[in-house]
Image (spheres, grey):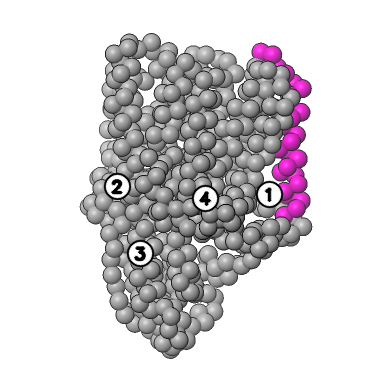
């Protein structure tokens, strides 16, 4: 399913990981010792990035062997996706008699496929996460010091891939204490990831003047998008909608999970939520950027996915009430803890923060269906919803790649037409658009100095972050052109409500749309 995406363009925060990887190849012990213009002016990379460097070290090693092409690097990250998929199956064997169903329900989701087609740290985090949980559960079951120590190292690797990985420490501590055997001595192995994190904080403080671990924690606690207040009813709708949309197998398997009465109740809840969203001023912030003709459609999608997201939490609580054992506690904390972090702790709600939920939710789906004792005929009936789930996941991942490819194509066209002159080609905007323009020699404008010359050229792309507008007397439009970016469904389109990478772009992880286009503008720069 991932192979068709191997050559797709880099996107969103991919360039930050790629630039750090290039730095690592030149200076292996100083991953963030360079400057980058990501917010409109040059800043130290150690201030810009809020991710640890292990994914970039992986990129640096891979690129040194097979090169920097999109196909090479995506293929290397597909290996991490494969580890997650296989690991989910083997982990599910410890929790349910239906591990194949659990694994498929986990990976046939929009969030898993879409995150798998990036070179950011998210799927690599999940690979280390699954390995850590597998080794820890095995170590407890067999009293294996080697497995527990290896699990500790995997936890440390997860935390150095993405800081959220450090939540494995309390998660597995609670799981251990909830086991009837209560092997308290096993908790000592949790000192391994704690020591790794302490070393990382000390090492980055020496390199960059402040420890990057605590710096990232402080950033997540104090920063937020200005679109939706962190602790509000609107934010609760957003996190439920992101969870429901990203984990859409919950919708397609609803009838296998819940009784007809519960499904009818969910449908009624969806209707009520849709009416309230469309009519209450309390939710106006969810529709600020939505085109007027799309408000009703966005409200309907929000209502549907909010109900599905609520069912994810209900599934965890139901399993906990029914079983009341260490395994149900682990799954509930894993699911609900990620849900709370993604909605109310992280600086923005996005699909990447939902990703860690996919495996426990897949296992919970299998455990719920297992409890229902459905017939052999009904088991065959699970195939159709899983096929539909796979098609939906591919559609979302395809849309995301199409948007990224449009940015690459636009950057290449602009560079071919306006690059290579005596004058300088500048640009506003970042993400993949920046990466490809810089590869062609263009430069990001420093908004603090606006250090351009008369006769230079400026390029912009509509779907982007940190875009600015020059004073109209400084620029003259030279060319405007559109490229098709998505059809049917979109992951980034404020007018349609889609904002997979940040809820500041839209309250939905993906949204139904007509034909979306990416607009590129080229300006002649005049005398200031």
Mark 3 or mark 1, which is nearer the start of the sequence?
1
Answer few, some or many: residues within 10 Å of disc 1's Cα (few below 14, many 20 plus, some between 14 and 19).
few
Q: Are marks 2 and 1 in contact (CB under 8 Å)?
A: no
Predominant SS of the magenta segment = helix
Q: Which residue is mark 1?
A: 214
Upstream in sequence: badge 1 or badge 4? 4
Q: Is residue 60 above or below residue 172?
A: below
Q: Nearer the viewer, mark 1 or mark 4?
A: 4
Quadrant for the C terminus in the image: bottom left
| Label at residue 120 | 4
Q: Determine if the magenta segment contains residue 202.
A: yes
Picture quadrant of residue 65: bottom right
Q: Sequence-wise, which precedes: disc 4 or disc 2? A: 4
Q: Is residue 231 left or right of residue 275?
A: right
Q: State the separation of the CA atoms marked 3 and 2.
A: 20 Å
Vertical comparison of 332 with 457: above or below: above
Q: Position of residue 480 (x, y in %)?
A: 29, 73
Task: Answer with left or right where residue 501 lies relative to residue 199.
Answer: left
Mark 4 packing: few (<14 Cα in 10 Å), some, or many (20+)? many
From the image, tell me which residue sits under label 2. 489
Residue bearing the label numbered 3: 409
Residue 453 locus on image (x, y percent): 47, 86
| Quadrant for the N terminus in the image | top left
Name the residue at 43% across, 13% down. Answer: 371
Front disc: 1 or 3: 3
Can residue 202 be seen here? yes
Instruction: Determine whether the residue tagged by mark 3 lies in a helix, strand or loop.
Output: helix
Q: Which SS class for mark 1?
A: helix
Contact, CB < 8 Å: mark 4 with mark 2? no
Distance, label 4 to label 2, CA atoms, is: 23 Å
In the drawing, does residue 63 fall left or right of residue 350? right
């Amino acid at each position: 399913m991932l192979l068709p995406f191997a050559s797709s363009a880099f996107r969103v925060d991919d360039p930050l990981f790629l630039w750090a990887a290039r730095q690592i190849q030149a200076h292996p012990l100083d991953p963030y010792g360079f400057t980058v213009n990501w917010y409109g002016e040059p800043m130290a990379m150690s201030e810009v990035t809020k991710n640890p460097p292990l994914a970039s070290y992986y990129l640096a090693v891979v690129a040194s062997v097979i090169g920097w092409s999109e196909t090479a690097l995506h293929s290397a990250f597909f290996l991490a996706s494969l580890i997650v998929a296989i690991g989910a199956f083997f982990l599910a064997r410890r929790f349910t008699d239906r591990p194949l169903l659990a694994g498929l329900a986990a990976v046939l989701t929009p969030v898993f496929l879409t995150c798998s087609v990036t070179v950011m740290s998210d799927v690599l985090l999940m690979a280390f996460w699954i390995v850590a949980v597998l080794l820890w559960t095995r170590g407890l079951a067999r009293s294996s010091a080697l497995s527990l120590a290896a699990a500790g190292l995997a936890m440390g690797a997860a935390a150095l891939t993405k800081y959220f990985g450090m939540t494995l420490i309390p998660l597995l501590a609670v799981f251990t204490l909830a086991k009837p055997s209560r092997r308290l001595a096993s908790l000592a192995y949790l000192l391994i990831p704690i020591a790794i994190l302490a070393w990382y904080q000390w090492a980055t403080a020496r390199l960059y003047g402040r420890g990057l671990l605590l710096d990232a924690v402080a950033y997540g606690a104090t920063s937020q998008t200005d679109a939706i207040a962190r602790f509000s009813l609107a934010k609760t709708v957003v996190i439920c909608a992101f969870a429901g949309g990203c984990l859409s197998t919950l919708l397609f398997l609803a009838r296998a999970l819940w009784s007809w009465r519960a499904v009818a109740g969910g449908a009624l809840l969806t209707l009520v939520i849709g009416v309230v969203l469309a009519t209450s001023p309390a939710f106006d912030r969810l529709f600020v950027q939505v085109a007027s003709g799309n408000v009703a459609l966005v409200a309907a999608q929000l209502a549907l996915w909010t109900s599905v997201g609520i069912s994810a939490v209900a599934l965890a609580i139901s399993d906990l009430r029914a079983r009341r054992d260490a395994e149900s506690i682990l799954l509930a904390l894993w699911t609900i803890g990620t849900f709370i972090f993604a909605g109310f702790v992280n600086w923005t709600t996005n699909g990447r923060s939902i990703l860690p939920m996919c495996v426990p939710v897949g296992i919970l789906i299998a455990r719920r269906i297992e409890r229902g004792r459905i017939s052999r005929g009904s088991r065959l009936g699970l195939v159709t919803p899983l096929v539909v789930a796979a098609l939906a996941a591919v559609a979302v991942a395809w849309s995301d790649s199409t948007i990224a490819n449009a940015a690459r194509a636009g950057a290449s066209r602009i560079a071919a037409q306006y690059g290579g002159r005596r004058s300088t080609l500048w640009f506003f905007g970042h993400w993949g658009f920046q990466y490809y323009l810089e590869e062609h020699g263009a430069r990001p404008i420093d908004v603090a100095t606006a250090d351009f010359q008369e006769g230079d050229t400026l390029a912009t792309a509509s779907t982007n972050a940190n875009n600015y507008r020059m004073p109209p007397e400084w620029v003259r439009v030279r060319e405007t052109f559109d490229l098709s970016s998505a059809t049917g469904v979109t992951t980034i389109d404020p007018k349609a409500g889609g904002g997979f990478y940040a809820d500041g772009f839209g309250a939905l992880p993906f949204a139904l749309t007509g034909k979306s286009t990416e607009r590129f503008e080229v300006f002649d720069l005049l005398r200031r």
